[in-house]
Image (spheres, rainbow, N blue to C red):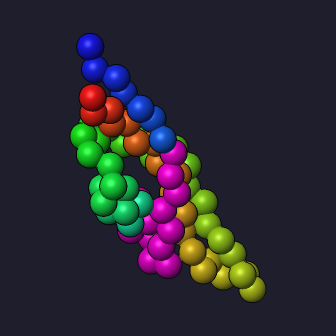
Amino acid sequence: MPVWKLIEIVGISDKSWEDAAKNAMDEAAKTIRNISRVSIEEFDCKVENDKIVAYRTRLKIIFEVER
């Protein structure tokens, strides 16, 4: 029976939420194998001087643990 693990990560971009999610996945894929599902849980922005300076997405990543 497989064992699955769930982690949460945050991606950041100065362009868009989509780019923030892609950045998070690109980084996660460097060290995590067997990713089977990603769920985007939250979107938010960092604001400075009344302007958006960063887009952030919080992702849940589910992957199978190797034995």
Q: Is residue 30 above or below residue 12?
A: above
Q: Residue 45: in sight, yes or no?
A: yes
Q: Position of residue 21 (x, y in %)?
A: 41, 59
In which quarter of the view is residue 15 placed? bottom left
Q: Residue furthest bottom?
A: 49
The C terminus sits in image quarter: top left
Q: Position of residue 17 (x, y in %)?
A: 46, 64
Q: Residue furthest right?
A: 49
Q: Is residue 38 left or right of residue 15?
A: left
Q: Which residues are magenta?
A: 8-22
Q: Is residue 61 left or right of residue 33?
A: right
Q: Residue 25: in sight, yes or no?
A: no
Q: Is residue 29 above or below residue 35?
A: below
Q: Residue furthest front?
A: 67
In the rendered structure, does residue 9 fall within the stretch colored magenta? yes
Q: Is residue 55 left or right of residue 26?
A: right
Q: Position of residue 2 (x, y in %)?
A: 28, 20
In the rendered structure, does residue 38 fall within the stretch colored magenta? no
Q: Is residue 57 above or below residue 4?
A: below
Q: Is residue 47 above or below residue 8?
A: below
Q: Position of residue 4 (x, y in %)?
A: 36, 27
Point 32% across, 32% down: residue: 65
In which quarter of the view is residue 29 placed? bottom left
Report the label total: 0
Q: Closest to the observer: 17 or 63?
A: 63
In which quarter of the view is residue 28 placed? bottom left
Point 26% across, 13% down: residue: 1
Point 75% across, 86% down: residue: 49
Point 26% across, 45% down: residue: 33
